[in-house]
Image (spheres, grey):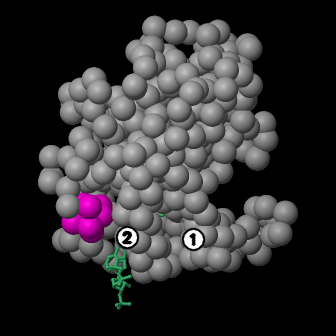
Amino acid sequence: MYNNLRPVGIIGTGKYVPENILTNSDLEKMVETTDEWIVSRTGIKERHIASKDQATSDLAYEAAVRALESAGMSGQDLDLIIVATVTPDMFFPSTACLLQDRLGAKKAAAFDLSAACSGFVYGLATATNFLKTGMYNNALVIGADCLSRITDYTDRNTCVLFGDGAGAVILGEVPQGRGFQSFDLGAEGSGGAHLYLEAGGSRMPASVDTVEGKKHFIYMNGREVFKFAVRVMSSATETVLGKAGITKEDIDLFIPHQANVRIIQSAKERLSLPDEKVMINVDKYANTSAASVPLALVEASEEGRLKEGDTVVMVGFGGGLTWGAAVLKW
Ligand code: ACO
């Protein structure tokens, strides 16, 4: 896919989750649900929730500082900051601009990217292309979300599913043969009505009615999103492998969006992958939207599950509807 352009890959990683943990038994006291239902239908046991004074940029900042440290860099070395999020601190300035200031990244361009749970992979593809063309040398890409701020904790259909967190990577030039080999990004806007947050934008500005009507919370048709997810997880993986000129047998670690362990198991079976090649941490963090794939990637790296030269496949799917897949030589 990228024959004559310089190799670009991940040269630093960091993650952050808030300290406060909300367990399934805590949720049993809030809505009519059970630990047994949540674990058997989703695989989720607990999730981390931001404290009252923490916003998405605070989570993103902690992850970014760790990623910069692991790359041996400071904010001044960055040329580009992309934050993938659907829960920015505010409409504008962007969360990326807030971070640019806090990190002292004076020469970095900065913008947010909205592709829901696929946002991190969209961000990786965007930054990689800036770096491959030589326009920039070092980029910070972050997936960060505080879904707890847009979750209705009286709605058992959604409140058990989500958590807060941030994962960050530094992209830069890597040795030949390593780095990103291919991307596959896609959208199915016709499915947008299955997963959305209705109010607060220009179509339906915030009002007493929108607040009383609970229109500032996530609405999700779980069954439709489930069907979409199962379909695109395997089709996007096969497409991105084909673009890289490799097959599913070449995968060393598969890092799927952590929404529901049943969706992950279904992709695992369709791709005939053994357990040890599939990263799962949805039990600890639940669905953290744009943070989900980077949290899983960084945790896999911290656990020593990634060796130099390994073939890593990341796949995200989410609101839009959108999907994004990447093949990376670690
Ligand atoms: N506890 C107990 N019962 C519940 C709960 C709960 N927390 N939530 C729903 N139920 C009930 C429902 O009311 C329903 O009852 P009914 O049959 O009497 O109507 C029953 O359980 C079964 O509901 P289903 O929707 O069939 O349950 P399903 O097995 O499909 O699981 C789930 C629901 C977990 C939401 C699943 O559909 C799913 O994971 N979907 C995908 C979600 C996803 O991946 N989202 C990603 C994007 S998120 C983003 O972008 C921000």
The chief SS type of the magenta part is helix
Q: Where ligand 1 lies, by quadrant?
A: bottom left
Could you tell me which residue is drawn at 46 percent across and 73 percent down? 228
> In the image, residue 318 lies at what x, y percent?
52, 61
Judged left or right of residue 317, residue 57 is right
Q: Amino acid at mark 1?
A: Leu
Query: Is tag 1's residue or tag 2's residue first in the polypeptide sequence?
Result: 1
Position of residue 56 relative to residue 234, above or below, is: above
Does residue 19 show up? no
Q: Quadrant of the C terminus?
A: top left
Could you tell me which residue is drawn at 24 percent across and 41 percent down? 252
Q: Amino acid at mark 2?
A: Val
Secondary structure found at label 2: helix
Is there CB contact under 8 Å for labels 1 and 2? no
Could you tell me which residue is drawn at 41 percent across and 77 percent down? 227
> In the image, residue 90 lies at what x, y percent?
72, 44
Judged left or right of residue 234, residue 106 is right
> In the image, residue 243 lies at what x, y percent?
46, 49
Q: Which residues are magenta?
A: 264-271
Q: Which residue is mark 2?
A: 230
User: Is ligand 1 closer than 8 angstroms to the Cβ of mark 1?
Assistant: yes
Secondary structure found at label 1: strand
